[in-house]
Amino acid sequence: MARQRLALGLALCLLASTSLWVLWGFARDWLLVSYVPFYLPCRDSNMKLQFRREKLFQPVTQFQYPQPKLLEHRPTELLTLTPWLAPIISEGTFDPELLQNMYQPLNLTIGVTVFAVGKYTFFIRPFLESAEEFFMRGYQVHYYLFTHDPAAVPRVLLGPGRFLSILPIQGHSRWEEISMRRMETISKHIAERAHKEVDYLFCLDVDMVFRNPWGPETLGDLVAAIHPGYFAVPRQQFPYERRRVSAAFVADSEGDFYYGGAVFGGRVARVYEFTRGCHMAILADKANGIMAAWQEESHLNRRFIWHKPSTVLSPEYLWDDRKPQPPSLKLIRFSTVEKDTNWLRS
Amino acid sequence: MAELCLGRQRYNSLHLGILLTVFVLVFFGYGFLSHRSQEFGDSEAVSRKTHAQPNVLTPSREDVLVLTPWLAPIIWEGTFNIDILNEQFRLKNTTIGLTVFAIKKYVVFLKLFLETAEQHFMVGHKVIYYVFTDRPAEVPQVPLGAGRKLAVLTVRNYSRWQDVSMHRMEMISHFSERRFLHEVDYLVCADVDMKFQDHVGVEILSALFGTLHPGFYRSSREAFTYERRPKSRAYIPRDEGDFYYMGAFFGGSVVDVHHLTKACHQAMVEDQANGIEAVWHDESHLNKYLLSHKPTKVLSPEYMWDQQLLGWPSVMRKLRYVAVPKNHQAIRNR
């Protein structure tokens, strides 16, 4: 009788402790999340922005170019169209002369945001000089350079129709903070200035250089670039944020491509919505004391699953020179500068 | 559970009670907490339905071109995932207008056209059929699915079939401004002597789309039956041209279709004043327009086929919109 009682008592204890352990496993996640209103009070949250009017295509003036070959056997080795019918831009998929013919008459202004904080001011000169040579030649370009130290910005000669604005921002001790604040800074900048000055906006990392032409083939409503490290890898291995509590959480069964945080852009109105959305998600995570695995890149990837890009750039437009160039990538246009990351971030 | 002894009855019930409560807590908590998901998506977001991962190193079709040199997708089976596209367009509550002309004896084609459209055309989306006819009483009563309407637009006829065909441009242009602009987001302009045989959905929708003529998709540009007389507004020289588009299936956003139809009508009026009629009528003018105003999507011949004339080659994985056999002599000019 005593044994039965003992057995019962033990069984009960076992059950109680198991269930308490299971409950704790979930409660740990649950407790971390406090309710955060999606739209935090923001100065510009009620502002209706008047974006520049969408330019209409003019009739193409005729000039000689070869007829497209409809029954082609593998013109390129890469996928050229996403499942939602967004073009994937790589060498061979487009006729640069034809596109120039279509876009030049529109008299577009392309904006570029680039951040150079701390020791990253070192990259400004090679970035701007290579951009002057290869980025949107023949178009009006406005570089928006955000830096904590305007005095450290070198004087770089710009071509006609190309401008540089130096915008002071706050530095931060943590490089992750600097990286994540870019979303907020870009959206605020669009609201204050860029929406009146440019038609398209690209948000680029500064520690890169242009190596080959980057032209109007990259213009689209919402543009993302495939990360060079993950284009040949199954989605379960993408470095998405995998913790459910985060606003950047992506499940194993989700995801099309892993996009790089170093290149994104599109029409100014779309970039505004996109960066605001990412910024809100970053704030929500902050309120819950969590930082996504790859900072704003994780949030960018989450958002691109929901709001699929209308144009996708192949890794030609975002390359890592440390990787061997595969034969399927014919022309690297924008790639990393060799650097010592630890020193830079100290 | 048997009582072990009178004295311990209390304890057994208590044990049971605790056990029960713990079980309930565990399962309820598990069920509830595992279903919590944080979604910060807003109205434009595509939901979390799973689909296969696209492979960057493998083209979707290896036998055909899927992207034009000006970066417009060419729609073939295998290039798109319809679930993703359906979600994107449903989220925007897209309404599609389908214009079709049934003048004089062509009213006989309406029944099959509409019935097959009900099965295959933009299923799941809001559709308005705009039936242009000179015989409104002969428009058949075809049962329509939910969210789908039919509007009969009474118009005049012309004695020559070439004029009937060409004046479609004028009529679409006129009604686009007056009516379509306020009722639909996209317009699809189709021939009536056809039937839908397989899926034709939102994958075709964009600012401006044309369809490849099934008789010329293998041809080089010199063989295209463009208008070759410089006197006509539809003239295209032998060394120019991307594709030969068919006049029987084109479309786009209402604004862009309005521009196209207005321009084509204008060009046809000028030709008439100059005493010339383009070799393939409105189709010639359509081709001229699409040469200088590049379409933002191009539909493969899957979207415009004649099985009787052309069979079923392997490059066509689906035959979606096909010709209905007809006696040309009997049906025209009556």
Image (cartoon, helix red, strand yellow):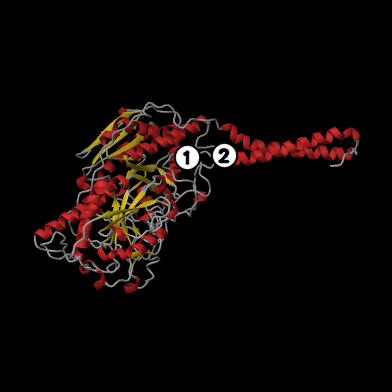
Type of amino acid at the residue the image marks with label 1: Trp
Q: Which mark is residue A294?
A: 1
| Real-space Cα separation, disc 1 to disc 2, in angstroms | 24 Å
Q: Is residue B311 visible?
A: yes
Q: Which mark is residue B36?
A: 2
Q: Which mark is residue B195?
A: none
Type of amino acid at the residue the image marks with label 2: Arg
Q: Is residue B2 above or below residue B169?
A: above
The residue furthest front is B137
Looking at this view, is B306 or A181 the one in front?
A: B306
Residue B142 found in image quarter = bottom left
Looking at this view, is B227 or B110 the one in front?
A: B110
Residue at left 13%, top 57%?
B269
Looking at this view, is B329 or A295 the one in front?
A: B329
Q: Where residue B186 appears, x then y in whole percent?
A: 32, 50
Chain letter for the residue marked with disc 1 in the picture: A
Counting every numbered tag in the picture gives 2
Q: Where residue A91 appears, x then y in whole percent?
A: 32, 55
* Element type at mark 1: loop
Q: Where residue A312 appears, x then y in whole percent?
A: 37, 49
Q: Residues within 10 Å of mark 2 (few under 14, many from 20)?
A: few
Residue A149 found in image quarter = top left
Q: Is residue A174 above or below residue B317?
A: above
In this picture, residue B84 sits left or right of residue A98: right
